[in-house]
Amino acid sequence: MGKKYPAEPFRIKSVEYVEMNTREDREEVIIKAGYNTFLIDSKDVYIDLLTDSGTNAMSDNQWAGIMIGDEAYAGSRNWYHLEATVKELFGFKHVVPTHQGRGAENLLSRIAIKPGQYVPGNMYFTTTRYHQEANGGIFVDVVCDEAHDSTIDLPFKGNVDLKKLQKVIDEHGAENVAYVCVAVTVNLAGGQPVSMQNLRDVSALCKKHKIRMFMDATRCVENAYFIKEREPEFKDKTIREIVFEEFSYADGCTMSGKKDCLTNIGGFLCMNEEELFLAAKELVVVFEGMPSYGGMAGRDMEAMARGLRESIQFEYIEHRIKQVRYLGDRLIEAGVPIVLPVGGHAVFLDARRFCPHLTQDQFPAQSLAAHLYVESGVRSMERGVISAGRGKDGKDHYPKLETVRLTIPRRVYTYSHMDVVADAVIELYKKRDTIRGLKWVYEPKQLRFFTGRFELI
Ligand SMILES: *Cc1c(COP(=O)(O)O)cnc(C)c1O
């Protein structure tokens, strides 16, 4: 692969100053935030790697699009532009706009899941699984075993294990499988990609059993870059061609516009089947808005249409992936345990190996994220037992991966910022035995990682 990191393929036209506070300030802030980085105010953060969701920088071309927002209640020009762009780049017959990705997940789960049906997926995602289960679906993880092991360095750790999928079909019957949900890339596995061959195989298996296949398209462009880099057949294909082929195997997709569409808000749901489209349109007016805006302003739809086109430019996506890899490589060189290989949107610290003195019920990842903030003003987030939540039986899910996610917003930070982050993590790693465990003070019933509060044990 070679260690080459391309310089930014853009120059900076507008800047936003960030404040730096002191360690004493941050010690107060983290207590006030209940040791939950989601509850820290933006003004108290120096480098914000909480998420890559909606934190992207837009281009001058997108901002220009904002000015031609057509804010008509129905039939906005910008909707038609967005719809045409999605159809052209993704190849689906129908598009339904939503306020963000989970809006699309809600609609899809309601129209495509009958209570008691199974929904196999390549690892869970928080909001995706919530909507599936809220509509009576039973999520089954069919990602390959390697995805759960942070030390195995393989090119496509997001792949569906076909044997596991076959087993779900054999055990429950194809009629009891609502659809198969394939995420490209797999966020919680570390932003790990799915190979085109795997998409082909899953699609063939689904077709054979007449089961629908939907994709979580959230990071489809990042996935396409990995396919180009790692699957020899695609070496000379454009990102655009690869994205189009990815979706050619699916019956539809949900999309969070806040990631690979390079915007700050928005989402959509796609499908080919007429009947599903009609059902989705009936529901979108209840939950999101007219089928020509779905919770988005006209200007947001324009920015999204333009962002989608920018995202499939090779120079953009190469820099994106390699900047994340740069941070990962610096940590690897220093011996910091991270999830291997480095994925598309984030570097994941392996909190079990970072904090071997803590047991999983002391929430090592939650605590590591809190300590990193106090140490450096860098905000990250937990992806471990807190995010995994509790099952129907009230027991905690104990995921194998207990990680802290350093998520890189698109086009926002420079390589110098990555150095600041790397130095902070390396410093903290040297004194890792000072990191103490946490216990609950307040545990919300749903998606508890967003608003839960903790204190030191
Ligand atoms: C962010 C995300 C979603 C949900 O999208 P929102 O726009 O945040 O509602 C779904 N799936 C994956 C993989 C995501 O990363």
Image: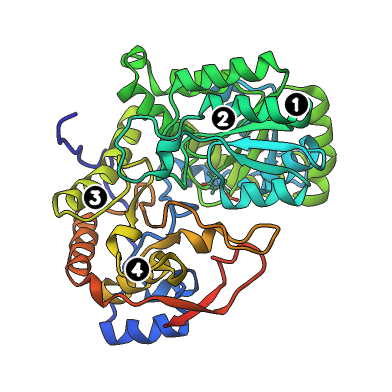
**Residue at mark 2 to residue at mark 3: CA–CA distance:** 34 Å
Q: Amino acid at mark 2?
A: Lys
Residue 145 or residue 242, whichever sits in front? 145
Q: CA distance from mark 2 to mark 4?
A: 33 Å
> Disc 3 residue type?
Leu
Residue at the (33%, 55%) spot, across then down: 350
Residue on which disc 4 sits = 368
Q: Determine crowd level at label 1: few under 14, some 14-19, many 20+ residues with C-alpha closer than 10 A.
A: some
Disc 1 to disc 3: CB gap under 8 Å: no
Q: Earlier in the sequence, mark 1 or mark 3?
A: 1
> Can you identify the residue that label 2 sits on?
164
Work out how far the residue at label 1 is from the one at label 4, CA to CA, in angstroms.
43 Å
- Horizontal and vertical percent for residue 104? 68, 43
As measured in the structure, the alpha-carbon distance from the residue carrying label 4 to the one carrying label 3 is 18 Å
Q: Position of residue 393 (x, y in %)?
A: 69, 60
Q: Is residue 59 visible to us here? A: no
